[in-house]
Amino acid sequence: MRKTSLSMGIVLALALCVGRVSAVQAGKSDRRDFEVSRNLDIFNSLFKELNLFYVDTIDAEKAINDGVNAMLARLDPYTEYIPEKEKDDFFLSTTGEYAGIGSLIMERDKAVYISEPYEGMPAQLAGLRPGDKIVMIDNDSVTGWKSAAVSERLKGPANTKLKVTVERPGVEGTLSFELTRKKIQIPAVPYYGVVCDSVGYIYLSSFTDSASDEVKRALQELKRQGITSLVLDLRGNGGGILEEAVQLVNLFVPKGEEVLSTRGRNKKMDKIYKTTQEPVDEHIPLAVLIDGGTASSSEIVAGSLQDLDRAVIIGSRSFGKGLVQSTRPLPYNGMLKVTIARYYIPSGRLIQAIDYSHRNPDGSVARIPDSLTHEFKTAHGRIVRDGGGIKPDIETTVERRGNISYYLMKDFYFFDYATRFAARHDSIAPARDFVLPDSVYDDFKAYVKSKNFKYDKQSERILDDLKEVAKFEGYFDENTQKQFEALAASLNHDLDRDLETFRDEIAQLLSIEIVKRYYYQKGEIIESIKNDKDLEEACGILNDEARYAKILNLPVKKQ
């Protein structure tokens, strides 16, 4: 009897404790709800008073959007408000699909130009070329329009017609083209092929809703061509749909493997993602190329394959985005893209590089230092670390381009010369065989000099800054002035010298722009991977069975 009374006492005590905890939690929830309601009332009343009494008319939409964006800016860069007019661009990033003429456009010199038609799309088939200045759409002049307005006008329902009038360099007057808009599907895999004799190569540009299927088809076709290993290029791939990353990993690992898990404040967002299909090839030697532009879903693929010891990761450290977003509908057809969870790859690590929940007093954020990261182990016991993105198994040196190359690109010298070159040459050699002739490079040099090309030299700016500091600190006298003058003379701008010093990289950038005029996106990739050091490193590892096995700590095969 005493035992029963004791048991009942414990039960009652526990019940009282639970009741108190529940009451505390309910109290916290009530207070939070009150704070939310109170502040919304304040904001609503404040804006009404401003709208009624402020000395100038307030643009309601802009003011509210500024307020919303300022609030979201305190969270992370991936949580954002998407108004109705921007939803099409958002869906384009996730589906790669829209209806229009199939061309990139660019804004320069207060006008809008065709910059890159897609092969086989209405713009290219109609005869529009890079460098064409758009002056009219149908019967409306677009002079002074921004690129966003021109883009909106070029898009429209599939199978509708429009007329685009352009001015073309070297052609008098204007040219008009009749086009029919069509459904445009931007490929996630713009190129795949065989490199290094028997190594397959697949370039994946984004994780749209067709990404894994496109990689699967490319892999199957390359296997039919007899490849013995594969390189998956994720450099510059900013990610996309999470589920597509899981399905892509599934092409190379068995059914039932955990690829990642997500954890959020709302436990409904906690989820484990596993492979659900039989793989296409779980044994083919695999290398993945990454760089600082490899982010989000790309990092899920690279990190999972690394954690599972399924691929050698080559390149430079990835971006470090370990956050998951989802969309929520808002009134008036708006949308909120909101971070709902963090994701963890198979070893259990989170690769998020920046902790946005802990900001500096000035509101800034910084990357997590390596000293504060933690060790995890891959399937075969290799040490990997969390925070700071995916660190490659083989790190390659990122070569910094010369300052002159940046300004030649920024000021459209490559683009404009390629436009002129294409107008004078009907064809060039196939992309794989094309080599920029010395005579063309010499002509490009003459073209640049004829335009009185000027570019910022960092060494000159730093010298000027140093001179100001020397004056401020009292070190500047007649002697130091002579030293500054001598140093300035040695740093004198010499365009001829710089065009020769950086000839190889300038010639490569020029070749890419020229080849793209004839062979479009595929040609651009083919040209860009010529003499690619990361790809050369990948081929060397994939063709060396012992080295590949050692890197991944694979079991030694018995002879």
Image (cartoon, rainbow, N blue to C red):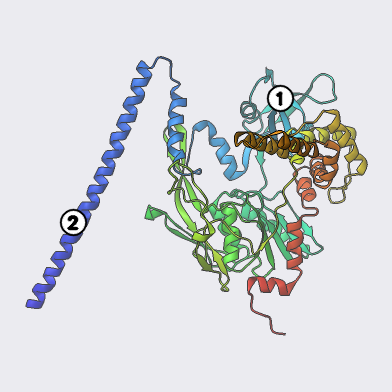
User: Given the current orientation, which residue lies at the most extreme top position?
Assistant: 55
Quadrant where the C terminus sits is bottom right
Front residue of 294/145: it is 294
Check disc 1: other Cα within 10 Å, few if <14, some if 14-19, many if 20+. Answer: few
Instruction: Look at label 2 and name its amino acid.
Output: Arg
User: Given the current orientation, which residue lies at the most extreme right position?
Assistant: 439
From mark 2 to mark 1, how far is it between C-alphas?
Answer: 68 Å
Q: Is residue 269 left or right of residue 498?
A: left
Front residue of 504/166: it is 504
Q: Are the residues tagged 2 and 1 within 8 Å (C-beta)?
A: no
> Is 299 placed above or below 228 here?
above
The residue that label 2 is drawn on is: 20
SS state under label 2: helix
Q: Position of residue 197 (x, y in %)?
A: 82, 63
Q: Is residue 355 left or right of residue 152?
A: left
> Is 470 placed above or below 204 here?
above
On residue 99, the disc is: none
Q: Position of residue 16 (x, y in %)?
A: 15, 60
Q: Position of residue 131 (x, y in %)?
A: 77, 30
- State which quadrant residue 457 falls in: top right
Front residue of 104/159: it is 104
Q: Earlier in the sequence, mark 2 or mark 1?
A: 2
Residue drawn at x 43%, y 48% as measured from the top left: 357
Instruction: Look at label 1 and name its amino acid.
Output: Asp
Q: Is residue 357 left or right of residue 32?
A: right
On residue 109, the disc is: 1
Residue drawn at x 85%, y 23% as measured from the top left: 171
